[in-house]
Image: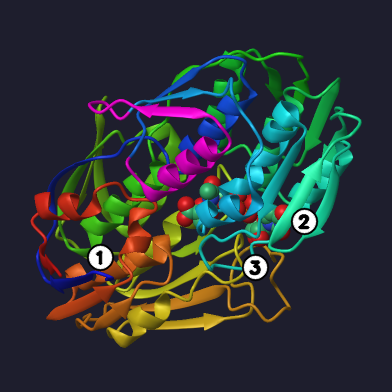
Amino acid sequence: MASVLTIRGGVPLKGKVSVRGAKNLVPKAMVASLLGNDSSLLRNVPEIKDVEVVTSLLRLHGVEVTKDPVTGDLSLDPTKVKTAQMKDIDAHAGDSRIPILFCGPLIHAIGEAFIPDLGGCKIGDRPIDYHLDVLRQFGAVVEKREGGISISAPKGLKGAKLSLPYPSVGATEQVLLTATRAEGITELSGAAIEPEIMDLIAVLQKMGAIISVQTDRVIRIEGVPHLSGFNHRALPDRNEAASWASAALVTQGDIYVEGANQPDLTAFLNTYRRIGGAFDIDDEGIRFYHTGGKLSPLVLETDVHPGFMTDWQQPLVVALTQAVGVSIVHETVYENRFGFTQALIRMGASIQVHRECLGSIPCRFGQRNFLHSAVISGPTQLQGTDIDIPDLRGGFSHLIAALAANGTSRVTGIELINRGYERFQSKLENLGADFDIA
Ligand code: EPZ
């Protein structure tokens, strides 16, 4: 039975939350363990659905995954890896996109992989063409099957000279996980260089990989025949940290985020300061708080790292509904990432979405029918309402809008939040939120 969160708004969130390992690194490091010829230990692992999905997929393939009952650390033993039944893989994959990253490691380990049709947040078409293109260039044979694709490499995987049309995080991870044990050198141009990518490179380097990253987004990997296991502490989740920071602004609160790491949040912190948010940084985390003054509108453009991260814009848009004036957000990474604004408009926000590129640079979605720019006028008083959560980050933005709104909101679909926010209900409770769950 799906749970319903009943939120009584108007209560400033105050207190401390801890963020642990990044949702967008931990599952990838778990997949990387398949490349090792002995066990790996992954630390700072959050209790989120995406980790559960990858745990079950790895176990399905014969990997022994053991979770420390106290610390949550995962030990992963890939030495008995085996192929798995297509129907079982499909049943376990859920709506995660991680299965596509099993290709390279499974081909290296057992010569083949079956990848079910992928899920993931409905924020765009979410194609995997870049992934399949690079796998073919490594020498893999990709065949479309009922319910997914099967991939093999009869002649083995060989290093290649690759170039991505767009710095895709997933496709860059695909190359890293395939090239490290491929024969020869791989050169990837147009690579993603997000902090989670750099942390995955750190994991692979610990295993014995030889990977260099150049300033011009070229990553060079020298294939090695064998990799060992790794012992790694995952970097903290910068997207969760930014989400709680926006929650502090929206509810006029004061939240200390233990684990927030300034270097991963530079673009976010600059924007936070511009809008009128305040933050104090210490060695263990960052305190984010509303100063009691007016919030200022701004023009914001999302971009790949080191730009303003696309996952940060949804919660921040809620804060912009409270800014005094007109703000513009140009979403350049995903074509359809403003669906969440419908619920905010129902709550009283003044937001229009447009198909034009309302930013400094025309992006891939200009002159096509994608409503990928938003104009937000504030301040508007938000009223509680019934909300069904559309996706992970949009869902968090609905939660904080409900927490700031006048009156009561009934929120369904909160299971989606569990995919990426560890124990968010207890965190909300600790911050003084007034809600019931049924
Ligand atoms: C990762 O998704 C993250 N997810 C996303 O976070 C994040 O928003 C995104 O990177 C960008 O930083 C995980 O790491 C699990 P992409 P990914 O490949 O790898 C297009 C969250 O909320 N593209 O960088 O799927 C794609 O359509 C999630 O935590 C192709 O066209 O993102 C998009 O427009 C949301 N063909 C753009 O590239 C491909 O084969 C960026 O996608 C692959 C991608």
Query: Circle 1 — which element?
Result: helix
On screen, residue 113 above or below 385: above
**Is residue 165 one of those drawn in magenta?**
no
On screen, residue 305 above or below 316: above
Res 8 label: none
Q: How far apart, in angstroms, are the residues tagged by discs 3 and 1? A: 27 Å
Which residue in the structure is indicated by mark 3?
125
On screen, residue 323 above or below 183: below
- Identify the image quadrant of the C terminus: bottom left
Q: Can the viewer see residue 288?
A: yes
Q: Residue at x 69, y 64 (%)?
A: 363
Query: Circle 3 — which element?
Result: loop
Q: Residue 13's x, y, as percent? A: 14, 56
Q: Nearer the viewer, mark 3 or mark 1?
A: 3
Q: Residue 1's x, y, as percent? A: 27, 71
- Closer-to-camera residue (83/315): 83
- Answer with mark 2 or mark 1, whichever residue precedes in sequence: 2
- Note whether ligand 1 is within 8 Å of mark 2: yes
Residue type at numbered disc 2:
Asp
Which residue in the structure is indicated by mark 2?
129
Query: Circle 2 — which element?
Result: helix
- Closer-to-camera residue (171/132): 132
Q: Nearer the viewer, mark 2 or mark 1?
A: 2
**Crowd around label 1: few <14 · some 14–19 · many ≥20 (10 Å):** many
Residue 292, picture quadrant = bottom left
The residues colored magenta run 47-72
**Is residue 61 one of those drawn in magenta?**
yes
Q: Residue at x 65, y 15 (%)?
A: 227
Residue type at numbered disc 3:
Asp
